[in-house]
Image (tube, rainbow, N blue to C red):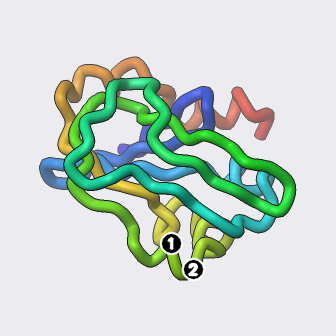
Amino acid sequence: MKKYTDQHEWVLFENDVVVVGITDHAQHQLGDVVYLDLPTIGKHLAQGEEAAVVESVKAASEVYSPISGQVVEINSALQSTPGLINSAAESDGWFFKLRPSSLAEMDKLMDEDAYKELVGE
């Protein structure tokens, strides 16, 4: 099940890792993404810690880690094709994968209905 933060990140538990990206709503707000600074593999991130920076034609925006864990993979396709974030924010445009420190932190995140209510959809 996909969960969401009030900072517009999504997280999806898959096997023993979680996949992290920004929501479709967030990419619409940003506009055309032109650059992305992803975390390094092996880095440990605390819940709510800045994990990445997205730059678009409109602005730069920080991306925060929805839960604590160690980065085990980054989406290297985004470095050559950052526009994937605009075309597939909640699928192929994922940012990184974490090995979670505590899955209990996911309980603090919103489900899809709560997120849609937050953004007025």
In the image, is 17 to the left or to the right of 35? Answer: left
Q: Nearer the viewer, residue 96 or 24?
A: 96
**Residue drawn at (59%, 34%), measured in percent from left and top?**
113
Quadrant of residue 34 in the image?
bottom right
Label 1 packing within 10 angstroms: few (<14), some (14-19), many (20+): many
Q: Amino acid at mark 1?
A: Leu
In the image, residue 62 sits, relative to residue 58, either above or below, namely above
Quadrant of residue 32 in the image?
bottom right
- Marks 2 and 1 close (CB-CB < 8 Å): yes
Furthest-bottom residue in view?
80
In the image, residue 1 sits, relative to residue 84, either above or below, namely above
Q: Nearer the viewer, residue 118 or 10?
A: 10
Disc 1: which residue:
78
The percent coordinates of residue 114 (x first, y second) are 60, 28
Element at badge 1? helix
In the image, is 42 to the left or to the right of 83? Answer: left
Which circle marks residue 81 in the picture? 2
Label 2 packing within 10 angstroms: few (<14), some (14-19), many (20+): some
Name the quarter where the N terminus is drawn.
Answer: top left
Q: Amino acid at mark 2?
A: Thr
Q: Nearer the viewer, residue 63 or 3?
A: 63
Task: State the separation of the CA atoms marked 2 and 1.
Answer: 5 Å
The percent coordinates of residue 9 (x first, y second) are 54, 41
Q: Tally the numbered discs.
A: 2
Name the quarter where the C terminus is drawn.
Answer: top right
**Residue drawn at (44%, 28%), measured in percent from left and top?**
49
The percent coordinates of residue 55 (x first, y second) are 70, 56
**Residue drawn at (18%, 29%), measured in percent from left and top?**
101
The percent coordinates of residue 86 (x first, y second) are 68, 67
In the image, is 21 to the left or to the right of 30? Answer: left
